[in-house]
Image (cartoon, grey):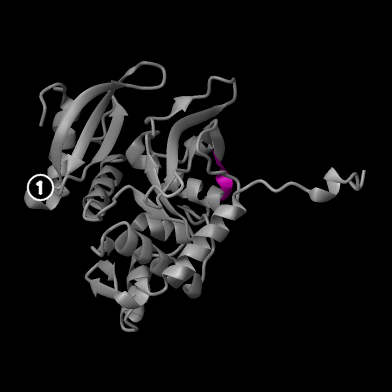
Amino acid sequence: MTTELKSSLAASLEAAAKKAGLVLVSATQGADFHGRPTAVFELGLPGKEAAGRSLKLELSGSFDFDKPELLPEMTAHLAAEAKRLRNSRPECYVTLGGLPLAFGQFQWPFHRSTSGADTYIVHGEIHLADNGTRNLHAKVAASVTLTFAEIVPAMEQPYAETFVYNAVRKTVDMGQLEFLKSGNRQPVPVTTRYYSRWQKKFIFTETDDNERLAYLLSKVYWLSGVLGGGKPVWIADPRDAQYLNTTEADLLRMAGDEAGAGLMALDGEFASATPALMARAADYQAALEAALDFTKPKFNESMRSGHANM
């Protein structure tokens, strides 16, 4: 661990990370959107498990999570990060439509909008994770209303990253984010329609068993078979469970059923792609092409010919 940042926050984070099975690789001082100091932590797995992989956690410099209302969720976040770091590409996720995406360069924590709107904003980028074939990405600005912020324990990365990432995936699913070689930031509204106050949980997409199974197979194909070199990927990720409106146990159940059909090799909460799944490469490539085409703006040809119904 570097000694560039020494604070009670660093000490608390290092202790929490250790309990989650993580090591604190570095702790440095950063700055948020408005130039205020932040604490930037690089987290990894211990020893040989590290394999050169790490994930970044950035918190407000004055943030104190060692409180009864904040500590449990921080603990859960770190425990999940420890399992994601066993993936070959821990920054990657897939969409229901079949797009593999790499999330990065998110500038935590949230900052208040500078346009005068009553919203909190976090900037980031998503890249199409197709091994650089197209070199496409989307710069995003995820916005949260002040009303929505009231249900979030803290406007910090561990308490918001999951629902922000899922809101991004949902926006892609709706064809409202375009992937480009360059371009301006595109809005990702995170509104109260994604949260059930009655059930006290986020709901992004209603899915059935068939859709969840298709999602799992797509995830294992891309994140294990294509991007992971055949190495296992975590399939009981609570981030995916929230995205699909299901539970981690249900994802494991379906993976177990499909493993019996020879498409996934299951090892606890992790699964790797089998030759039978990789033989479906043409199907997954076609799904990627269709999902990518769905995100492209469509021009109404009848308007070009002057046939618009005015």
The residue that appears at 53% across and 19% down in the rendered structure is 114
Q: State which quadrant residue 306 falls in.
A: top right
For the N terminus, give its image quadrant.
top left
State the extent of the magenta-drawn residues as a range: 189-194
Q: Nearer the viewer, residue 203 or 281?
A: 281
Q: Which residue is mark 1?
A: 46
Q: Nearer the viewer, residue 244 or 51?
A: 51
Q: State which quadrant residue 111 falls in.
A: top left
Q: State which quadrant residue 41 falls in.
A: top left
- Residue 176 counted in the magenta span: no
Residue 257 image position (x, y, % from top left) = 35, 80
Identified by mark 1, the residue type is: Pro
- Mark 1 residue crowding within 10 angstroms, few (<14) / some (14–19) / many (20+): some
Q: Is residue 274 shown left or right of residue 121?
A: left
Farthest bottom residue in view: 261
Farthest left residue in view: 47
Residue 52 image position (x, y, % from top left) = 17, 45
Residue 185 image position (x, y, % from top left) = 53, 32
Q: Is residue 186 shown left or right of residue 59?
A: right
Q: Nearer the viewer, residue 109 or 216?
A: 216
Q: Is residue 213 above or below residue 87?
A: below
Residue 89 image position (x, y, % from top left) = 29, 51
Q: Is residue 15 shown left or right of residue 84?
A: left
User: Helix, strand, or loop for circle 1?
Assistant: loop
Evaluate whether residue 195 shows in this view.
no
Q: Is residue 95 shown left or right of residue 6?
A: right
The residue that appears at 15% across and 49% down in the rendered structure is 51
Evaluate whether residue 279 shows in this view.
yes
